[in-house]
Structures are given as structure tokens and as C-alpha cells.
Image: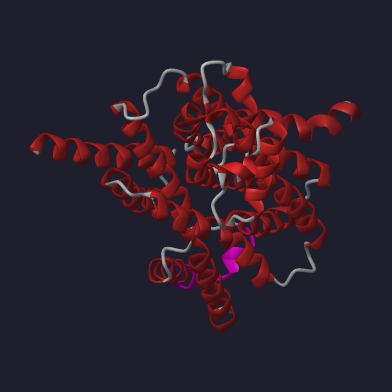
Amino acid sequence: MNPLLAELWPYLMLILVGFLPNEMWRLLGLGLARGVDESSEILVWVRAVATAVLAGVIGKLILFPAGALTTVPAPVRIAAACIGLLAFFLVRRSVFAGVAAGEAALIIGALAFSP
Amino acid sequence: MSDIRPETVGSSPLSAFLAGFEAAWRSVFAYVLFGTFVGIGALGHDFGFSIAWMLLSTAFIWAGPAQVILISTLGTGGSAIEAAIAVSLSGVRLLPMVVALLPLLRTEKTRNRDLLLTAHLTAISMWVESLRLLPSIPCEQRIAFCNGLGAGLLAPSLLATGVGFYLAGSLPPVFTAALLFLTPLSFLVSVVRNSRLLVDRLAFALGLALGPLLAAMKVELDLLLSGIAGGTLAYLVHRLRKVMR
């Protein structure tokens, strides 16, 4: 591989493997948004599938994380997520309260139970 | 975190942009995103990516989970195809968000290219805040307002990517773990907040159960399969309830 290509290679990967596979959904959305009725049935199904995919992403990030989060035991991660949700419902459906409580629970749990 | 009053938006596109930019800093997501991207910046540093690459990935991809997937897949020697598929699967959620948001911004004079930047800036955080704040924004100001909102959320994320990159290594592991936990936690809470219809709640619960289950069983394309299965099941229940009524 010539030096210039070697230097540009990571950026080419960023565009081809990161940017385009992600951006195509936004561009497709831009095309489909034209003339789509917000109350149409197909959109209800598409949104349900997208919500389920997003939930799957969340579940996987909590149960099978990457990086430093792997050092926190799984029961602590699950309990912290539940405590965050509980705080959200108890404190006037505040996202801030939920996130703050869940983070506090994760840090305390990690300090108490990490090997 | 107060709502925007119409008189604060002004009548020029610039003042609407600035009102959106300002609204971003009153949103909980500006702070959640700052923390998240400190974590992502540190992750990128640990996997050997350059600071320029990291900043470009935040600006161009602008989707936390996709960036974590891209960085960890490429960083651990995964194939480009594998990474592209995983990134693309995590990005599926952007499609219905864009489809649901753009009709709210469109006026008779709007061309598709006027919405290109707004579509790019659409992310979970920007989408949630747009839907909350748009009702008080005059129709013809909404594109500029949303662009300002997106830019206002992207700016602290770019800053945080750089901060995280340079702090990597000096951050205590517990702190890095807590930052990486911000993404699933804040999405979890905000999606629960915004799922008001049965079909969305059901789809969310099914996806939350099926996604990790299929991943644990090492099924290929686990997220896509769990999304289609969970979403379709939730939709069928929704249809069945409609028919029964």
C-alpha cells in the first residue's frame, strides 16, 4: 500500500463503513418523508420495528457492553438501569432524575462489587 | 428546561437558529451527550484512532451507538463488512425518526435540499427535543430552529470527544464505565418517556428482551431479527386490538 493511501485509509473506512451505512437511513427518511402521512399504517409498523431495534441496542449495551463497562458486574448494570427507570417514574417523569439515579447506582455498585 | 416562547424565536432564520442553539443547552441531553462523548473519545483513543478521525466520526456519523460499534469492531480487528452491517443495523432507527420529523418542518416552499442538514442532524436526542419544542415555534422558522438545536447538541459532543480523547488513560476506570453507561441509560429512560402508545411500549419491551436473547444465542443479524420480530408482533397486537373493537 502506498504511503498516501495508508494515511487516508482510516478516513476512507470512516466514510464507507461508518458514515454511509448510517447516513443512508437519514437520506432514505428524507425521501420517504415526502408525502408520507404521519398516521399511515406502514409508519406504525416501521416505528414499532425501529423501537424494537433501539430497545435491542439498549439491552445489548447493558448486558454485553464494550470497553470499561465490562469491568462492572452484569447484575450491577441491570440493577442500575432499573433504579434509573424507577427514579424516572418517582420523580415527575424526569429524564434527568432517572439518568442521575442510574449513574449514581452504577458508580456505587461498581465501587462496592467490582473485583 | 423551560419551553420556548414564540417571541423569543424572532423573525429571521438566524434568530431562530440561535433560539434552537440556546434550547439545546437547556436540554438534559446537552449534558448527557457531553458525558457520552467523553466516553467515546476515550474509547477511540484506547483503540488507537487519531483525534481528527474521532472528531470527524462525531460530526459525520453523529450517532453514539454506531460510533461505539464502528470503533470497537474496527479496533478489535473486525472486518469492514461486519462493521458496516452492524453500523447500518443500529442506524435503522434513524429512518422513522426522520420520516416523523420532517413533515412538521415542511412548508409549501420547502425543497428537499433545504431539509438535508436537518436530516443529518437528526439523532435520538435532537428528535426528542424537537418534538417537545416545535409546537411553540412558527412553521416557517422550524427548519432553522431544528438546525440550531442539532448544532447546539453537536457542539458539546465535539468538544467532549476531544476532551475524552486527551483524558483517556487518566480517567479512573469506574468513571469511564459510568460515561459509557450514559448511552443505554439515557436512551432507556427517554424512550420510555416517549412511548405513549401500546404498540411502542410493546415493541420496546419485546426488543429489550429479544435483542440480548438472540445475541446470547449468537444468532446472526440478531438486532435486525429481534427488531423485525418484536416490532411485527407489537404491530399485530395493535391491529388485533383495533379489529376487536
Q: Nearer the viewer, residue A9 or B177?
A: B177
User: Residue at 32% across / 30% down in the picture?
Assistant: A39
Pinpoint residue B6: horizontal percent, then vertical percent.
57, 42
Q: Nearer the viewer, residue A2 or B122?
A: B122
Choose top left, top right, bottom left or bottom right for residue B179: bottom right
User: Residue at 46% across / 68% down in the picture?
Assistant: A84
How many numbered badges does the structure rendering display?
0
User: Residue at 41% across / 67% down in the picture?
Assistant: A92
In the rendered view, would you say A8 is above or below B162?
above
Q: Is residue A78 magenta?
A: yes
Choose top left, top right, bottom left or bottom right for residue B10: top right
Q: Is residue B62 visible?
A: no
In the rendered view, would you say B44 is above or below A33?
below
Task: Indicate how the structure is coloured in the image.
Answer: secondary structure
Q: Main secondary structure of the magenta part?
A: helix
Tell me the quadrant of the picture where the C terminus of chain B can be found.
top left
Residue sticking out furthest to the right: A3
Q: Which residues are magenta?
A: A67-79
In the visual, does B237 lie left or right of B140? left
Tell me the quadrant of the picture where the N terminus of chain B can be found.
bottom right
Pinpoint residue B219: horizontal percent, then vertical percent.
40, 43
Q: Is residue B116 visible?
A: yes
Q: Nearer the viewer, residue B170 or B161?
A: B161
Q: Is residue B19 magenta?
A: no
User: Residue at 19% across / 35% down in the picture?
Assistant: B239
Pinpoint residue A35: horizontal percent, then vertical percent.
42, 18
Residue sticking out furthest to the bottom: A112
In the visual, does B226 lie left or right of B57? left
Pinpoint residue A43: horizontal percent, then vertical percent.
35, 30
